[in-house]
Image (tube, rainbow, N blue to C red):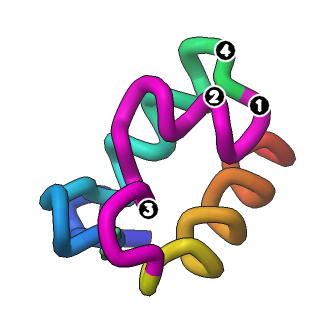
């Protein structure tokens, strides 16, 4: 996976930023949103953000 790829284009949040949030202890969408804001604007990226959180939690 490309960690520099943007998953949330509203806020320029990359895969790597979601990963960092999960690795710093955020387990849920809500917790990741508190740190990154991903998915809090238009919501179009929510499915992708959720999938990434699951994937990084499983690492
Ligand atoms: S693309 Fe993530 S909130 Fe719009």
Q: Could you tell me if the residues under marks 4 and 2 are in contact, i.e. CB atoms within 8 Å?
A: yes
Q: Under 8 Å from ligand 1: the CB of mark 3? A: yes
Which element carries disc 3, helix, strand or loop?
A: loop
Tell me the CA gap for discs 2 and 1: 6 Å
Residue 53: where, in percent of width, then height? 68, 52
- Vertical order, 27 against 1 (above or below): above
- Say which of marks 2 and 1 sits in front: 2
Q: Earlier in the sequence, mark 3 or mark 1?
A: 1
User: CA separation, marks 4 and 3?
Assistant: 18 Å
The residue pinned by badge 2 equals 31
Q: Position of residue 25 (x, y in %)?
A: 67, 15
Estimate how packed mark 2 is, as few (under 14), some (14 to 19) or many (20 or more) residues with alpha carbons within 10 Å: some
Q: How many marks?
A: 4
Q: Which residue lies most toward the top here?
A: 24
User: Residue at (77%, 31%) from the top-left corner?
Assistant: 27
For the residue pair 9 and 51, the one nearer the viewer reads as: 9
C-alpha span from label 4 to label 2: 9 Å
Q: Which mark is residue 39?
A: 3
Boundaries of the magenta span: 27-43
Q: Which residue is mark 4?
A: 25
User: Residue drawn 18% across and 69% down?
Assistant: 10
Name above or below for residue 28 compared with residue 55. Answer: above
Place of residue 34 in the rendered image (x, y in percent of width and height, measured from the top left): 48, 27
């Amino acid at each position: 996976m490309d960690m520099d790829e943007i998953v949330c284009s509203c806020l320029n949040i990359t895969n790597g930023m979601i990963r960092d949030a999960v690795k710093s202890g955020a387990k849920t969408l809500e917790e990741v949103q508190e740190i990154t804001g991903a998915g809090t604007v238009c919501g179009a990226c929510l499915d992708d953000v959720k999938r990434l959180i699951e994937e990084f939690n499983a690492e």
